[in-house]
Image (cartoon, rainbow, N blue to C red):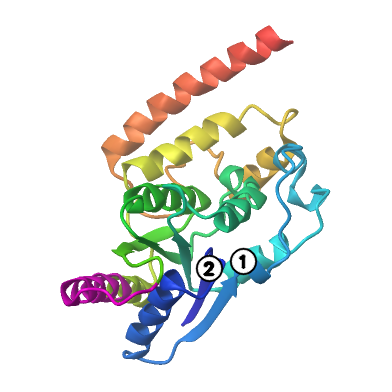
C-alpha cells in the first residue's frame, strides 16, 4: 500500500504532525509505504496563465519545473493525502501553486484508481472552506475522496486542552480508518450526483471542440468518454436519475457552446 502526502505547509508543524499521526494509525494495521512531499522543497513555479496546457497539452507548458514529477508520484500511489493548513480561510499559497500548476487535469482527469484523504488544520475557522475546495479539486481530478478531516490546533503549537486532544485524535483515527477501508476495497464506489455532473459537463465542453482544444478532444476520445451512451469516466453503476439529469445538462450546454461558436465565427 503506497501512500503519498502532498504537504502544503511550509513547516513541519500542526498539519505535518496530523499527517504523521494518520501514518501511525495506518501502520497499526500493517506496513505502509509512505512518502511525504514538502511542497516548500519542490521546484514549482507559479502558473503564468498562458493557457497553453489546455488546448495543446501539458507537455507544451513553457515552465520546466517539477510539476510532471509530482503528477507521476500521484499516479504511482494507491492513496494520496492532500494536506494544507488554513491560511486566510483557504489553502496555503504552496498548495494553491501546486493545484494551479496541474490545472490541465481539470480538463483531462486521470486519478480514478487512487483514493484521497483531505486534511487541514486551523486555529479557529476556515476548515470547511479548505476541505470543500480540496474536495472539489480531488473529485474533478478523478480521485475517490475516501475521507476528509480538519482539526483545531494552536498556531504556536502550545499544549491543547485535553478535550481538544481527544477530539482531534478521534477525528484523525476515523479518517485514517475510512481511508484504509477504501484502499483495501480497491474497487470504485458509485459516483455521487456532482461526480456525474462533472462528467457530463466535461463531455459538453469537449465533444465539439476538436479545433479549439485538440488536446482535450483527443484525450477524451482515447479514453472512450465521448462514445454514445457513456455514463461515467469508469465502468461503475450510475444512478439512473443522476444520468438522466446529466444528459439534459450536457445537451443544454452543448447547444449553448455551439451557439457561442457560431457567434464568435
Above or below, comparing residue 148 to residue 167 in the picture? above
Vertical arrangement, residue 139 with respect to residue 264, above or below = below
For residue 54, side relative to residue 114 (left or right): right
Q: Secondary structure at mark 2?
A: strand
Tag shown at residue 39: 1
Residue 107 % position (x, y)? 60, 42
Q: As rendered, which of 220 and 53 lies closer to the eye? A: 53
Q: Which residue position is annotated with label 2?
A: 7
Q: Which of the two residues, 86 or 34, is positioned nearer the viewer here?
A: 86
- Magenta residue check for 75: no
Q: Quadrant of residue 186?
A: bottom left
Which stretch is magenta? 157-176
**Residue 237 visible (yes or no):** no
Main SS of residues in magenta: helix
Camera sees residue 25: yes
Q: Give the CA separation, mark 1 to mark 2.
A: 6 Å
Asked which quadrant contains residue 122, the reply is: bottom left
Depth check: 142 or 118 in front? 118
Q: Identify which residue is drawn at 47% across, 61% down.
A: 84
Q: Examine the rendered structure and indicate whether residue 199 appears above or below residue 109.
A: above
Residue for point 35% across, 50% down = 126
Amino acid at each position: 500500500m503506497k501512500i503519498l502526502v502532498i504537504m502544503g505547509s511550509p513547516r513541519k508543524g500542526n498539519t505535518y504532525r496530523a499527517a504523521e499521526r494518520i501514518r501511525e494509525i495506518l501502520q497499526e494495521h500493517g506496513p505502509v509505504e509512505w512518502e511525504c512531499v514538502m511542497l516548500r522543497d519542490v521546484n514549482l513555479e507559479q502558473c503564468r496563465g498562458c493557457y497553453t496546457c489546455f488546448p495543446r497539452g501539458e507537455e507544451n507548458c513553457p515552465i520546466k519545473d517539477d510539476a510532471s514529477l509530482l503528477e507521476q508520484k500521484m499516479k504511482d500511489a494507491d492513496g494520496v493525502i492532500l494536506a494544507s493548513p488554513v491560511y486566510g480561510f483557504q489553502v496555503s499559497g504552496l498548495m494553491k501553486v501546486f493545484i494551479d500548476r496541474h490545472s490541465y487535469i481539470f480538463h483531462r482527469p486521470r486519478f480514478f484508481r487512487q483514493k484521497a484523504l483531505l486534511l487541514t488544520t486551523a486555529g479557529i475557522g476556515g476548515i470547511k472552506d479548505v476541505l470543500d475546495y480540496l474536495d472539489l479539486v480531488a473529485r474533478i481530478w478523478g480521485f475517490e475522496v475516501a475521507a476528509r478531516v480538519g482539526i483545531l490546533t494552536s498556531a504556536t503549537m502550545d499544549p491543547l486542552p485535553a478535550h481538544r486532544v481527544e477530539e482531534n485524535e478521534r477525528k484523525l483515527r476515523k479518517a485514517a480508518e475510512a481511508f484504509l477501508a477504501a484502499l483495501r476495497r480497491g474497487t470504485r464506489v458509485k459516483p455521487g450526483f456532482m461526480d456525474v455532473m462533472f462528467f457530463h459537463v466535461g463531455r459538453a465542453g469537449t465533444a465539439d471542440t476538436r479545433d479549439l482544444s485538440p488536446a482535450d478532444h483527443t484525450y477524451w476520445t482515447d479514453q472512450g468518454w465521448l462514445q454514445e451512451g457513456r455514463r461515467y469516466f469508469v465502468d461503475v453503476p450510475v444512478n439512473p436519475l443522476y444520468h438522466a439529469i446529466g444528459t439534459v445538462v450536457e445537451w443544454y450546454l452543448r447547444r449553448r457552446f455551439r451557439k457561442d461558436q457560431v457567434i464568435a465565427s
